[in-house]
Amino acid sequence: MNNSSIEQYISPVVMAAGGPPWKRNSIGRWSAVCAGVLMLLLGVSPATGQVPDALPGRVPTLAPLVREVTPAVVNISVHGKVRQDNPLYKDPFFREFFDIPKQLEQEVSASGSGVIVDAQRGYVLTANHVVDKISTAQITTKEGRKFSAKLVGRDPATDIAVLQIQNGKDLKALPMGNSDRLEVGDFVIAVGNPFGLGQTVTSGLVSALGRTGLGKQGYEDFIQTDAPINPGNSGGGLINLKGELIGINTAILSPAGGNVGIGFAVPINMVRQVMEQIIQTGRVQRGRIGVTIQDPSAAGAVGEGALIAEVSPSSPAEAAGIRRGDLVVKADGVTIRSAAQLRNKVGLTPVGRTVQLTIRRDGSLQNMEVAVAPAENGSRASHRGGR
């Protein structure tokens, strides 16, 4: 299945207001059963992910973990008005003939999920498409407490937004983990508010890492999971067995619109970088070093990394000594497996900072420090593009 055919099945998992079109689904039940059986066989502790001695007569359960993390996952309800941009509405003769006001607005009502990550300051992470048409929202906690929240900022390119709860008290925050340490096969749980039913927990595995080419966001590095994710789960948390937030749920691959065991989350390391910039400046400023990159396979080579296809004149990359044909294998000590991964790394590094690149040239490795400059306005996301 190529990218163009995949894109038509990618759906953001925000739920519009209205009756839930839910159907009975056995996938979540089987995921939980399978996870339980595996943990029973392996003796895995839900709280730590370690392998303790199994206790006679005890059934493995994720309940202690769920009790610990679910208070930090909230429901987000948005209500507002969206301006309708029909060119005819700008025509004064059309408006006068049909007695139409100068601006028409449409009522918007939707729901999604979010995760409290800073209890003291009330910061909530969610998916951008949950709140992209509003400036305020209502937050409902697991206990049923309701708070108003304002939009701090959002980043459509990564589908991440930050809200701030107003006058919040006794909030519970979820610690952020390190998504770079995830491995395929790790157990995870997904927490959210599917179909407006209320807080729901599902379990599964990390099915794949570094998913790109889905045609959804400008910056793609998705965690793929088979933990059931449904409409209304957008902005909810993907959580490891240590109780750490390792992703923000954002989309599903579904020909019919429901869960088929292929869901996607934005890695928390990417989310953290976006959140820090939004809190500081209200927006995300993209960085660049002045190179065009591609996957090695695009040049007929084998292996992982990001191949330098071009170096822009007078760019930070040229000043650092990077040449065409260099293969970037690490960035700030993190292994680079694809051009998209390097592009995400550079694009989300704050302007003015440096990034240390490890490159392979003529069979030997070299380390180079490259300054990150502001990205050109209007630059678009692509695997082979200016970074």
Image (tube, rainbow, N blue to C red):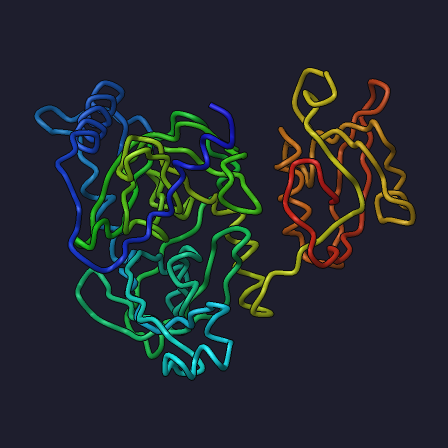
Residue 17 vertical placement versus 55 (above, below) = below
Residue 208 percent coordinates (x, y): 44, 28
Residue 69 percent coordinates (x, y): 28, 51
Residue 313 vertical placement versus 335 (above, below) = below
Residue 18 percent coordinates (x, y): 19, 58
Compared across the picture, whether 306 is left or right of 322 comes to left
Residue sitting at 18 percent across and 34 percent down? 61
Quarter of the figure with the C terminus = top right
Compared across the picture, whether 339 is left or right of 185 comes to right
Residue 370 vertical placement versus 283 (above, below) = above
Residue sitting at 37 percent across and 33 percent down? 225
Picture mark count: 0
Residue 378 percent coordinates (x, y): 69, 56
Residue sitting at 46 percent across and 60 percent down? 161
Q: Residue furthest left?
A: 57
- Relative depth, front residue between 68 and 76: 76
Is residue 121 among the parts visible in the rendering?
A: no
Residue sitting at 28 percent across and 51 percent down? 232
- Dividing the picture into quadrants, the one containing residue 280 is bottom right
- Relative depth, front residue between 143 and 316: 316
Compared across the picture, whether 104 is left or right of 320 comes to left
- Relative depth, front residue between 356 and 91: 91
Is residue 227 among the parts visible in the rendering?
A: yes
